[in-house]
Image (spheres, rainbow, N blue to C red):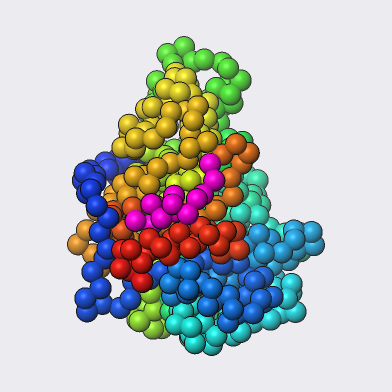
Amino acid sequence: MNRRKFIQLGVIGAGASLAGVDPLRSDPVAPSTAGKSPVTVAMPISVAPLVQRDLDVMFDDMRTRAGVNALFIFIYSHEPHRAGVEAEGFHGGNYARPHMEFYRDTPLTLADMSAPEFNNMDVLERVIPVAKKHGIRVFPFILEDNSLPEAVKANWETLYEVDHHGQRTSGHPGGPCFNNPGYQNFTLGLVEDYARSYDIGGLMWGSERQGGLLNTLGLSQSSGIDPGRTTCFCEFCQKKGAERGIDVERAQRGFGEVETFVRNCRAGRQPRDGYFAEFWRLLLKNPEVLAWENLWATSRHELQASVYRKVKAINPALQVGWHVWQNVSFSPFQRAEENLADLAECSDFIRPALYNNVAGGRFKVFAKGAQASVFGDLTPEATVEVLTRQLNYNEAPYDRLAETGFSAEYVARETRRSVAAVTGHPVQMWPGVDIDVPVGAGESHCTPDGVAAAVKAAFQGGAEGIILSRNYVEMKPENLSGAGKALRELGVI
C-alpha cells in the first residue's frame, strides 16, 4: 500500500462520524429476565479488604445492600491504591500466584510479578470458594498501570512506550506498548493463567490511556500532560508503522510541530490565523500524525482481540469484557478514536465508566486543557458550551460544573449511545456508575437518591447489567444501599 492511500485510510478510520442518540424514554425500564441468567450486578474491589476482612461478613453486606453477584478484583497491579496499601516501599504485582509456565516469552521474572505485600497470599484461591458460597462470581480486573514502583522498574520499563524524542516513558500518559512482544506475551500469559488456574466467571481488561496526538494536545481529564511525551515510537511501533506505509521520520517531525504549537498556546502566543486553523493546518501539513494516531488506536484493539481469542480458546463460557476510560465521555476526539463498534466482535460485555457525580470536575479539567490548545479561540465557558453540544449533553454551565456534577441523564444518554454502537451483536453493556468516587474540594458528593437515579438511568439507557463503581472500599454504606433500593424497584434483584 502506498503512503498516500494509507494516510487516506487512517484519516477515515480516525474520523468516523458518531451514531445518533434516540430521545430518552420517560420511565426507567428494567431488563427482561425471562429465560436469562440473573442480571449482573458487579462490584470492583481492591485487594486489601479481601485479605484483611471477614469475607462472609463483607460478601453478605454486598448481597444484602445491593444484590451484588459479581466481584471485579484489581488482581494485578503495581498501583498502591488498587492494592489498597500505602505507597511507601510498595512493590505490587500479581495478587494470585504466578504460574511461570505461562510467562516464558517475557523479560519479567517471578520476583517482578509476585506481590509480597500480603505474604504472597493467593487472593483468588482465598476468595473464590467463599464468593461462590454467596452466589458471587469472581472476575479478575486487569487495569493497566500508570506508574512503575522502583522495585520492578528494571525489567518492566523495557515494555514501556518511547516518546517522539526517543525517551522511555515510565507512567501516565504513557504505558506499556501494545506492539511490544514482551508486553503482548505478558498480557496473554496473564489471562491464560487466570483462565486455566482458577474457577473464574470471566475477566475485564482496561487501559486508561489514549493516543499520542490527543495527549500532546492536552485533550484529557488528566491535567498538566507534557506535550513532549507523545508515544509510541519504540522499535516495534516504528517497524509496524513502516510496514503500513507511514514515513516514520515525517511522523516524528510532525509530532514535534504539534508539541511546539501546544507550548506556544500555553505561553499565550496566539497563532496568526487562530488556534483551530493552525491546528488543522498542522494536520494538513503532517498527515502522518493522524495516521500514527490511528496506528496506536488500532494496535490496542488488536491486543484486545487477541485477549478475547486466548480466553475463549481455553473456555468459551468465560465472559470477556472491557473497561472504557471516562475520558471518552468528555472528548469528541477520543469518542471517534475509541469506537465501541470496533470491539463488538471481541466482547461479551463492555463497561463504559459513567461516573456522573465526579464528571463535573473532570469535564472542567478536560475543557481547560482543550481551551489551552485546539479551542484556544474560545473562552473556557464557550469551550464547555461547544463540547456539550458536540457530545449531546445538557449539563450545568462551566462555573457550576464541579459543584453540581453531571446529571443522571448523562448516564442514560451515554449508555444508550454505547448500546447503539454494538447493535446487532450479542454484547451486553454494563455501565460503571458513580458511588463515592473521590472528588476535590468544593465538588459534588454522592447521595443515596443521586446514586439511585444514576442506576435507574443506566437501565433506562438499555444496560443489561451494572458495575457499582469504582471501589467497594470507597463507598459509604448508605449510598450503596441507594443503589440496592433502585435495583429492587426496577426488579433487577
Q: x, y percentage for residue 357?
A: 48, 46
Most common SS among magenta residues: helix
* Residue segment shown in magenta: 444-456
Q: Residue at x 43, y 72 (%)?
A: 67
Whether 451 is among the magenta residues is yes
Horizontal side of residue 4 vs 326, given as left or right: left
Outermost residue to the right = 89
Horizontal side of residue 409 vs 50, given as left or right: left
Compared with 476, 283 (above or below) is: above
Q: x, y percentage for residue 271?
A: 49, 15
Horizontal side of residue 43 vs 127, given as left or right: left
Horizontal side of residue 24 vs 51, given as left or right: left
Q: Residue at x 32, y 31 (%)?
A: 389
- The answer to whether one can see residue 293 in this image is no
Outermost residue to the top = 272
Q: Residue at x 49, y 77 (%)?
A: 138
- The answer to whether one can see residue 270 in this image is yes
Whether 417 is among the magenta residues is no
Which quadrant of the view contains residue 87? bottom right
Q: Nearer the viewer, residue 221 or 266?
A: 221
Compared with 253, 316 (above or below) is: below
Q: Quadrant of the C terminus?
A: bottom left
Q: x, y percentage for residue 381?
A: 45, 23
Q: Nearer the viewer, residue 130 or 306?
A: 130
Q: Residue at x 44, y 52 (%)?
A: 449
Compared with 388, 346 (above or below) is: below
Q: x, y percentage for residue 260?
A: 56, 26
Q: Nearer the viewer, residue 197 or 360?
A: 360
